[in-house]
Amino acid sequence: MKKILIAALISILTIEYAYAEGKSDYEEALAWRNFVTSETRPVIGIAFGGGGARGMAHIGVLRSLLKSGIPIERVTGTSIGAFIGSLYSSGASIDSIEELALSTNWSNLIELKTSRISIFSTRRLEEFIEFHLQRLRRNSYDSNIIFETAVNYPKLNSSEIQFADLKIPFACAATELYSGSIILFDSGSVANAVRASCSIPGLFEPVQTDHQLLIDGGVLMNLPVSLCRKIGAENVIAVDVESDTTEKLSGLMDILSQIIKIQGYALTENERKLANAVIEPSVGAIKITELERADEAVRRGEIAGAAAAKKIRRNLLELNEDTEFFQITADDISGIENVIKQLRTQRNAGSILKTSELTSALALSSKLGLDREALALYRTAQPSDTLSLFSAELSSIRLKLSDQADTILQSLSAKQLPENYWWELAAAAVIANQNKIEEKILNRIKERRLDAD
């Protein structure tokens, strides 16, 4: 474990995001703040692709983009992407969406209903979606009330949530089985449309509506970028969770999913070309049925979103000069995840963590955008070394934990950090709209310069 951490830490200290330029990073953040409030800027949308359990990475990507100050104003999705997209468009918080994804027993949402054209019914999935759309939309989600064993999910309102009821414009795609055409949903019942978009042919029964027989949208549009543009997005971020699938095919769902992927490969490539940015979370090792690995998929999405966010901001600001960005491989991520798990186990067992391991893991978690993990490590051992304090401060600012950021800031002297580190903190405060923290950091920079004189 120590070797992994040391190697990872060296990579952090030698491969820069573009933060090493110091003050220019802060100035770029100020430019971004002006850009976001501009009435003439492009409308930013996101297109979530299909991919079963891998699609839980959409939650992490979304968390990182929003944390990085990138507004999402249009949302489209296919299959699992439609599910995640509909929840976010309802106005639900990322925390509540993630909690729902991690606490649900997904096997209870399908019913055995063998017929000549399918094996399972997704009636309960539609009821589940409708139920939680209403709860999340009202910000009344309670993780202790899941109704997993109920035959039917209770209706909270007499009327179903319609697309027009959503707080963010949303659309999703399904495939019409008879005509072989793409059906684009942007009106009517949201839950029914999402159910249709998720109906893997041969496995889940098609959805019958208006003389149409609807199946998974991934057959013809697994990455709905063009749909996102159709509903008003002028700059589209695509999240493709099927780009690095490497696992062996070992079941019916794997095979059906692979057939859909092969059929739609050329179409997906065309959709990717229409995107302004494509984010590819490293989730290929997760099978589409492995919903028990949702936590892992979310975390990998968070890493991918954090790595892409700065480049997306720079592209929107039309800062197109070559910049070296932090890159990390799937094997590196697996190694880091193992380290974090081991440290978490030690922490829960009350073991004393080695300072070097803790510092490295904390710094690495913060650099990767895993701010919650970074702060969990910080709170466990309260390290006092400079790198740990800087990393914890950076994560606190990003998560808008003003009181904690202020407390850590008080323990850092102006001379304790290199000036470019202070500018990095100031830039993070601008992006997070933490104005009081930003002011205090700028005062530290002034103090540092006065001391230097």
Image: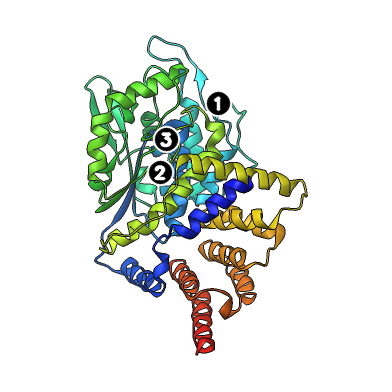
Question: Which residue type does callout 3 highlight?
Answer: Ile
The answer for how far apart the CA atoms under marks 3 and 2 are is: 8 Å
Residue holding disc 1 = 107
- Dot 3: what SS? helix
Horizontal and vertical percent position of residue 352: 76, 53
Left or right placement of residue 239 versus residue 123 in this view: left
Residues 103 and 255: in front is: 255
Q: Is residue 189 above or below residue 438?
A: above
Which of the labelled discs sits on residue 80, or is there none? 3
- Dot 2: what SS? helix
Question: Which residue type does callout 1 highlight?
Answer: Ser
Residue holding disc 2 = 85
Residues 196 and 233: in front is: 233
Name the residue located 65 percent from the left edge and 75 percent from the top edge: 411
The answer for how far apart the CA atoms under marks 1 and 3 are is: 15 Å
Image quadrant occupied by the N terminus: top right
Q: Is residue 16 above or below residue 175?
A: below
Name the residue located 65 percent from the left edge and 59 percent from the top edge: 378
